[in-house]
Structure formats: structure tokens, C-alpha cells
Amino acid sequence: MAGWRIGYALGPKDIIDAAKKIQSHSTSGATSIAQYAALGGLTAGPSCVDYMVTAFRERLIVLMEGLQAIPHVHLAKPEGAFYAFPEVSHYCRGKLGDSVIQSDFDLADALLEKANVAMVPGTPFGAPGHLRLSFALGLEDIREGIKRMAEVLATWSEA
């Protein structure tokens, strides 16, 4: 349910009551569509979960192998969710074609423009010089995105 932003909490009544006070002022209500999707996810049974665990494990392996094959990209194995945070600081100062790169923001913008690969700069997550990539998509899309990313990064030069 990537991106649906729905969840629930269980716990002692006093803690849940306190959490409700905070949550009710910080997020909006979940749409009925998201609620029904969550219900489907919760009632689908273990075979659905087993399938997704296997699929995400394979996606992670493909993503890690692809990123680690790109020079100057360093990646610790993600331990949760479906995001990778490769360290790409080598590419955060220089040029990609006609684009001057001075930060992970510039690098993410250039990769979107030149490779049609969307990712988020790491700085807002407290990780400057990193990029946040999702692997909640199909294997062929992951392979193609890494290929495009590698092709663009191969054009990097010092400014």
C-alpha cells in the first residue's frame, strides 16, 4: 500500500487517547477508498504478504546490485520500508551536461530532467549527499531507471 498513508495503532487506552489528540490536529482523514484498500490488505491473508515479501526482496537485490555497479555510488542495505538512500556526494559538485550540480537537490533535478528518473534529495531527511529512491515498482522499471541514471551519471564532469 505504498503511498496510501493509512495506518492504525494498538496500545494502552491512555497512550492511544493521547496519540489521538496529537494525530487529530496533524493529519486529515483517510479517504474511503484508502480505507477499503487497507481493509483488503488486512484481510487478504498470508499468501498475499508472502508474495509481497518475495517481490520486494527481489526488487531490493536488483536495485542494490544496479546502484553498486555505478562508480562513486555507495549504498547500505535498506533495513525497512521500500526506499534506498544511496550516498552520491561525488556527483553533488560538478556538471551533468549543461547542468551545474551544487547539491543533492540539483542532482535529483538533473536526473529527473535528463534521465526521467524521479527521486528525492536526501537533505530533507537529514542525509545531504544522498538520494531517496523507491523500489515500490516493477523490476523492469527499476532496471530501466538504474540504466538511465547510470548513463547520465557517466557524463559527470568537474565544474
Image (tube, grey):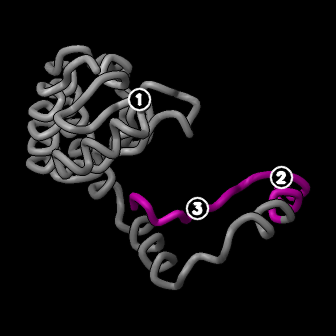
Per the image, label 3 sits on a secondary structure element best described as loop
Q: Which mark is residue 151?
A: none
Query: Residue at left 26%, top 38%?
Result: 99
Foreground: 20 or 42?
20
Q: Nearer the viewer, mark 3 or mark 2?
A: 3
**Magenta region, residue range:** 1-20
> Which is nearer the N-term, disc 1 or disc 3?
3
Q: Which mark is residue 7?
A: 3
Per the image, label 2 sits on a secondary structure element best described as loop
**Dot 2 amino acid type:** Pro
- Whether tag 1 and tag 3 are in contact, CB under 8 A, the answer is no
Q: Would you call the spot at circle 2 few (<14 residues within 10 Å), some (14-19), or many (20 or more)?
A: few
Check disc 2 and report the residue beneath it: 12
Q: Is residue 105 visible?
A: yes
Query: Where residue 19 appears, x then y in whole percent?
Result: 81, 57
The image quarter containing residue 78 is: top left
Q: Residue furthest bottom?
A: 32
Q: Which mark is residue 102?
A: 1
**Dot 3 amino acid type:** Gly
How far apart marks 1 and 3 lie (CA) works out to 38 Å
Query: Residue at left 45%, top 82%?
Result: 33
Q: Would you call the spot at circle 3 few (<14 residues within 10 Å), some (14-19), or many (20 or more)?
A: few
